[in-house]
Structure formats: C-alpha cells, structure tokens
Amino acid sequence: MPANETAPRLRGKYETEIIPALMQEFSYKNVMQVPRLVKIVCNMGVGAGREDAKHVTDAAEDLGRICGQKAKITKARKSISNFKLRQGMSIGACVTLRRERMWEFLDRLVSLALPRIRDFRGLPAKGFDGRGNYALGLKEQTVFAEIDPDRVSRIQGLNIVIVTTAGSDPEALSLLRKLGLPLQEK
C-alpha cells in the first residue's frame, strides 16, 4: 500500500518501512496481523482545580494547543471528602487523538518535544501494560513548542497513553522503537 502524499511523514514510514520489517521480525503471514497504532490519549489531571476552576480551563487550553484538538474537561465521578472533592467538580482535561492527528502528534512528540527534556536518557521500557499499550508521563507541558513558557501560569504534568493492536509487549516495544520512540533497554 503506497503512502498517501498528504499523509503524515511518520505514517508513510510505517506503511513503507515498518510493516515489512515487523512482518519479517515476527514472521506474520498477513499484513493485518502487524501491530498498528489505534489512538493516543493525552490527559492532564489538575488537583488545583478544586480551589480555582481557571487552572482547569488553562490546562484544557494548553492541552488543546499541544494536541491540535479541543480538550474535554473531565469531572469527578464521586465525592471524596479527604481530598475535598465533590461529585461533578472539574478536575482535569483529556484529548483522544486518532488517524492523522495521532500520527502528527507522535511525530512532534518524538522529533521535537522529547529532545527538549533536560537530562533526557530515554523513556523507561516499564510503561507497558501487558497488552501492548504504552503509557508515559511528562513533568511539564512546556517541552512542546506550541506552549509559550512566558504565558504559562503554572507548570502542569501530562500523561500520554499510546494504544496499539499488538498482542504482547515485545511486539509493541518493537513497533514503538521502529516509530522512533527512544525507549531504554529493559
């Protein structure tokens, strides 16, 4: 299947180079057996949103800028008195990326954002869940070029989950390494 001219760069690489390499490495008989990306979920939990709802809306705007898609504000499902949390309070923001936006985001994450992290030695390989999905956390949202550090009111962490169709962690590890994710050796 030839790469589409308007398709993201990383998707073209997946279709032309990575699929044949994975078919040979894991001896798949059919192209449909090759693991692929399903979606990328980006999440910001905002604990300070209890006191001031502006923190949640700022986080949602930042997440929208990073992902190129409007963020959904998440609300608490139940009340927890120890955390001074009531049901229905805004506590975070979430974006689910699929198709073209997913590929563009992953390309920007690998080539622009991760190299900007100070003292970066690779992502830990222990972020796999046993079913071929990978989760990573960033300590601040300012590593993305879309965020102007001077306009940030508070530094906020960011969770990223990469969901694949891989049946096992070694298959997903191989896929993500070939896509350019700098994963450390186990």
Image (cartoon, rainbow, N blue to C red):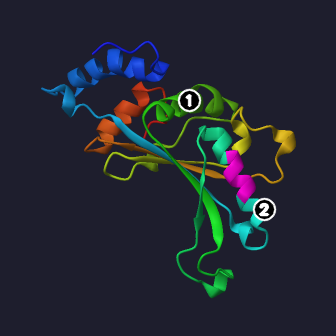
What number of labels is visible?
Answer: 2
Give the percent coordinates (x, y) of residue 125: 45, 43
Viewer-side residue, 140 vs 49: 49
Horizontal arrangement in the rendering, residue 149 relative to residue 102 (left or right): right
Q: Which element is circle 1 on?
A: helix
Label of residue 54 in the image: 2
The stretch of residues the image draws in magenta is: 57-62
The answer to whether residue 140 shows anywhere in this view is: no
- In the picture, the quarter occupied by the N terminus is top left
For the point 60% across and 35% down, which residue is it?
Answer: 121
Horizontal arrangement in the rendering, residue 115 relative to residue 181 (left or right): right
Viewer-side residue, 98 vs 125: 98
Q: Which residue is mark 1?
A: 110
Mark 2 → mark 1, Cα distance in angstroms = 30 Å
The residue carrying pointer 1 sits among few (fewer than 14), some (14 to 19) or many (20 or more) residues within 10 Å by Cα, namely some
For the point 64% across and 74% down, which residue is it?
Answer: 89
Quarter location, residue 80: bottom right
Badge 2 amino acid: Lys
Viewer-side residue, 49 vs 27: 49
99 over 7 or under it: above or below: below
Horizontal arrangement in the rendering, residue 125 relative to residue 58 (left or right): left
Give the percent coordinates (x, y) of residue 119: 69, 36
Quarter location, residue 94: bottom right
Q: Which residue occupies the extreme left position in the image?
A: 29
Q: Earlier in the sequence, mark 2 or mark 1?
A: 2
Horizontal arrangement in the rendering, residue 80 relative to residue 24 (left or right): right
Q: Main secondary structure of the magenta part?
A: helix
Quarter location, residue 123: top right
